Amino acid sequence: MTDSNTQIRLATPQDKEAVTRVMQEAGLETEAALADGTTYWVLEQGGKPVGAIGLEHGDGASLLRGAAVLPSVRGKGLGRQLIMSAIQYAQGRGDRAIYMFSKGGDWSNFGFQQVPLAVVMGEVPNAPQIRAYQARSERPGGTTWMRNLSVGASKA
Ligand SMILES: CC(C)(COP(=O)(O)OP(=O)(O)OC[C@H]1O[C@@H](n2cnc3c(N)ncnc32)[C@H](O)[C@@H]1OP(=O)(O)O)[C@@H](O)C(=O)NCCC(=O)NCCS
């Protein structure tokens, strides 16, 4: 929960259209969103979807996917709440780290550090987003990031 008008809730298969629309409006790819082995959340304001985020789960690690807040409601802390709730969930399932790709932005804001692409490919090789790239014979562009979730890791 965030406030009485704004809530973050788990996405169900019925939310796929809303989640993909929000991700598209935020300029993100939506291929394999809500695939098996993933957990997604919807951020709603006044009952309308204005944000989304997902985790693609691997063995002891997850790939953060589709962090999206509609442009009209950005800069108010909603993205941080979405990202922190996904991080908490990953910690709860016992992940040692979360990985992600970004095309811009400084994710050290959220406790991430840059890592080589090979690290992500090795840690979550079966993540739907990675398999989608492989099916197209492409490699993810941009920057690759890791947030260490081990006990004692610094929190942002
Ligand atoms: C990234 C995004 C979800 C942030 O949403 P938001 O509601 O504006 O975020 P907040 O208001 O909670 O801001 C949180 C922090 O993120 C920073 N930030 C803003 N855009 C960012 C971006 N693209 N990447 C990294 N950090 C970003 C802000 O500077 C802010 O830092 P601060 O808390 O130190 O001031 C939103 O800008 C978005 O949807 N971007 C397009 C999609 C995208 O690039 N997603 C990430 C790749 S999966």
Image (cartoon, helix red, strand yellow):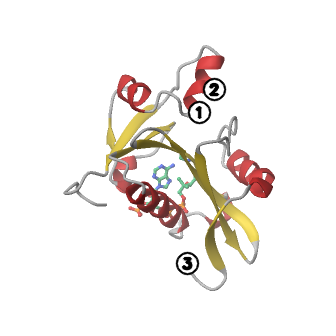
Distance in Å between CA atoms under marks 2 and 3: 33 Å
When asked about the image quadrant of residue 156, the answer is bottom left
Element type at mark 1: helix
User: Residue 30 shows which numbered tag?
Assistant: none
Q: Nearer the viewer, mark 2 or mark 3?
A: 2
> Hey, what amino acid is under mark 2?
Ala
Element type at mark 3: loop
- Residue beneath label 3, please? 2
Badge 1 vs badge 2, beta-carbon distance below 8 Å: yes
> Disc 2 beta carbon < 8 A from ligand 1?
no
Q: Residues within 10 Å of mark 1 (few under 14, many from 20)?
A: many
- Residue beneath label 2, please? 132
- Split into 4 quadrants, where in the image is the N terminus? bottom right
Q: Is residue 22 left or right of residue 151?
A: right
Distance in Å between CA atoms under marks 1 and 2: 5 Å
Q: As rendered, which of 86 and 117 lies closer to the eye? A: 86
Residue sitting farthest toward the left: 152
> Hey, what amino acid is under mark 3?
Thr
Residue 68 visible in the current orientation: no
> Is 24 drawn above or below residue 89 in the view shown?
above
> Is 61 drawn above or below residue 70 in the view shown?
above
- The residue sitting at 32% across, 32% down in the picture is 115
Q: Locate residue 116, reporting x and y percent.
A: 34, 27
- The residue sitting at 39% across, 48% down in the picture is 107
Residue 134 visible in the current orientation: yes
- Residue beneath label 1, please? 129
